Image: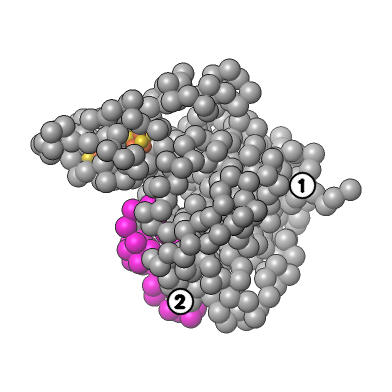
Amino acid sequence: MADKSKVIIVPCDRYDSEQVYTAMKAGIDALGGIKSIIGTEEKVLVKPNFLSAAEADKAITTHPAVIEGMFRILNEEGFADVAYGDSPGHGSCEGAAKKLDLQPIADKYGVARADMETSILTEYPEGQTAKSFHYCKGIVEADAIINLCKMKTHALERITGAVKNVYGYICGAHKAAGHVKYPNPAIFARMLADIHNSTDTRVHIMDGIIAMEGNGPSGGDPIEMGVMLFSKDPVALDTAFCHIVYLNPEIVPTNAQGEAMGIGTYDDSLIEYILVDGGISEEITVEQLQKLFGKRDFKVDRKGGSKSLMGRLSAVSMFFAKKPVIKKKDCIKCGICVDHCPVPGKAVDFRNGDRTQPPVYDYKKCIRCYCCQEMCPQKAITVRGRG
Ligand code: SF4
Ligand code: SF4
């Protein structure tokens, strides 16, 4: 019988550098230690979630204490060629790092900022859904990638965790084009699985110390969860996240499609959940995981599902999908939503170019990618309804 996927669960309730480092060391050691996963001679890329340039306490990005913990472990273990980087949905890697005061930390551990601005067209004929990608140079140059994802909700995929975080491998504006090419949650998730299969992401670490609930991945609210998750299997790791927030793992497209495409499993009978706490390591059940860390009232979309009629219809028809709505009183008319709408001719735009009023939607054109909601800096866009 094949080995089970392991998810290591380590409590951590504060972004104290020492505490986070200790938790990360314990989590990675429980997976066999970083040197059992990556060779010290390899070129390593540490890939956080830098959705946009945002302060650490907003819970939009992976917290700098988590990034520092990874740098420190790699440094202590003798890894000499380490870089970090992500391609944000809005702005630059440099801008996001600056907002998190990351550069002094990177300098301290001799970690370079990777080139995430140069795009390299990478053919992938084996892809089941995507046959090529415009990867960032920093992704192509890395021998091994460490995925430092953030525990957050997501309008399109319900959650963003280990599977979804790899979309930042795609360079800049090519991400918007991907939403047009892969226009519904299931197809988009299949494309994400092709990214996993075409790159060498060796380990996935989730910052769930303070997560984001509600209108994620950028406009939601921070919520204390007090946990870090570690796994080599991105689907199993996201499944642990689902259990913690009482979301059925099988209705999450990145889980269902990820398992179908062989990047991991959401089947609990094939996953070992291992709690590592205070030097003690023990296998726990889903019920114990929920008892320790679960939040039943965590705000996430639990409605419908791939097996329900509405879930299937919303996956194939725009008519049944949730729609983005602008809260006029919160809109500052910055136009970022318009800039990020990937649809030719724009599905959200200022009426007659009048920037004194909020933009308006043309729902007939809208492909429900929710890039506008994701990028709005004012939390002025929500997604409503299902069916
Ligand atoms: S991005 Fe948000 S604040 Fe800016 S125009 Fe669009 S809705 Fe308004
Ligand atoms: S209006 Fe928003 S949800 Fe619709 S296609 Fe444009 S960015 Fe996507």
Badge 2 residue CB within 8 Å of ligand 1: no
Q: Amino acid at mark 1?
A: Glu
Q: Amino acid at mark 2?
A: Ala
Q: Nearer the viewer, residue 13 or 270?
A: 270
Q: On the rendered structure, is 42 left or right of 329?
A: right
Q: What is the residue that sits farthest to the right in this orientation?
A: 1
Q: Which residue is mark 1?
A: 272
Q: Position of residue 376 (x, y in %)?
A: 30, 42
Q: Nearer the viewer, residue 270 or 320?
A: 320
**Mark closest to the chain's N terminus, 2 or 1:** 2
Q: Name the secondary structure under disc 2.
A: strand
As drawn, the label of residue 112 is: 2
The image quadrant of residue 61 is bottom left
> Along the horizontal axis of the image, is 253 left or right of 327?
right
Residue 50 located within the stretch drawn in magenta = no
* Vertical arrangement, residue 224 with respect to residue 251, above or below: below
